Image: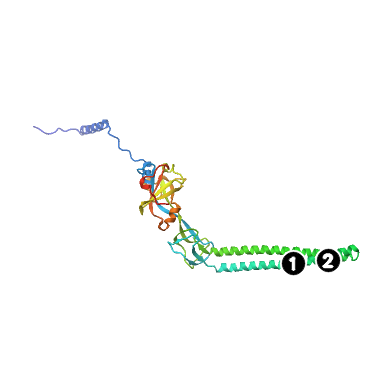
Amino acid sequence: MDTTFPLVPRRALNRLIARPAVAFLCALALAPLGAPPAQAESRFEALLEKFGKPSPDADIYHSNGRIEAQTVDVATKYAGRISTVSVEEGDLLAAGAEIAQMDTADAAAKLNGAKAAVLRARASKAVAEATLMQANSTLDVAQTNFERATKLHDSGTTSQSVLDDATNALNSAKAAVAMAKAQISDAEASIAASEAQQQQVQLMLDDLTIQAPIRGRVLYRLHEPGEVIAAGSPVVTMLDLTDVYMNIYLPATVVGPLAIGDEARLVLDPIPDKVVPARITFISPQAQFTPKSVETTEQREDLVFRVQLTVPRALLSEFETQIKTGVRGIGFVRTNPTADWPEHLRTVIAD
């Protein structure tokens, strides 16, 4: 038997090969569709996942953050040379504690000059008062002579010229009294100006002793004794331990129901078993791009609102020695202020 296959033209062969492929595609198109694939997570859900994913408890949202504190630059009011710096970085200072001392030689000399000016003004007043006493005595004599001359003139005993001389003497004595009183007023004004100048120099001298404006911790010591600094240059930077907070970032739908003064909770990485009470003290009126520390490439264009959670001052004063900025943690907020906190957020450190 001849098993040789007959030759088939190339064009016919192509048609034979193409038909099964077309048939397969048609069958695939006519086949019933299966269940649709699960939809990808929406951008909003992704944003909630990153910044405000709800906890298993309703109305509770959270976001990562870190502890921050308000910093205060303690600066010198006047230019000069630093004599001493009394604090080190990390020191806990009470309000009014001495931080540094500027050189006081120039201010002390000005104060001595101001005190001398006060003494001079008071001496001028004493001289003016003595002059007034003398002028009053002269006025009394002139008044007596005038009255005597007037009586003699009326009786025809003395001439008009004698009365005129007595009148001129009386007027001159009155003018001398008025001048002495003016000198006293001028001396009093000089005393007031000199005392004000002395007070100003004294305040300048007091300001050369740089004191802590608040109770807080020294964060940076910026200058050393012997350095000459300009007016307004900070000598140290302090942390205000009465103003400690955490900034978290939440989407608009979460921020919308929040209000200033609402309760919040903080759980910090070093003490995960402790719940720190806080309150919402600031909600940004404008949205912003996700902060660099928590953003991802896919969410760079997403906008969130900054919410500030502040720890009560009474609690801060009790644990001020343990307060450290930069500590990471999680901030929790409630979109429904009447909702109960879940059990793991209910027991907080007493404030």
Q: Position of residue 165 (x, y in %)?
A: 84, 66
Name the side, left or right, on which 42 lies relative to 285. left
In the depicted view, which residue is nearer to us: 156 or 203?
156
Farthest residue in the top direction?
A: 30
Q: Nearer the viewer, residue 275 or 187?
A: 275
Q: In x, y percent, where is residue 206?
A: 55, 64
Residue most toward the right? 156
Residue at image x 58%, y 64%? 202
Q: Are marks 1 and 2 in contact (CB under 8 Å)?
A: no
| Mark drawn on residue 156 | none
Residue sitting at x 57%, y 68%? 108
- Is 334 placed above or below 221 here? above
Viewer-closest of 135 and 308: 135
Neighbour tally class for label 1: few under 14, some 14-19, many 20 plus, Cα within 10 Å: some
Where is the N terminus found, in terms of image quarters? top left
Residue 72 at x, y percent in the picture: 48, 57
* Alpha carbon separation for disc pair 1 and 2: 19 Å
Give percent across and percent down for residue 63: 38, 47
Q: Quadrant of residue 241?
A: bottom left
Asked whether the viewer can see residue 289, the reply is no
Q: Which residue is mark 1?
A: 133
Q: State the SS at label 2.
A: helix
- Hey, what amino acid is under mark 2? Asn
Way the structure is coloured? rainbow
Closer to us: 163 or 249 = 163
Q: Would residue 247 appear left or right of 196 to someone viewing this image?
A: left
Q: Amino acid at mark 1?
A: Met
User: Element under label 1?
Assistant: helix
Q: Which residue is mark 2?
A: 145
Camera sees residue 111: yes
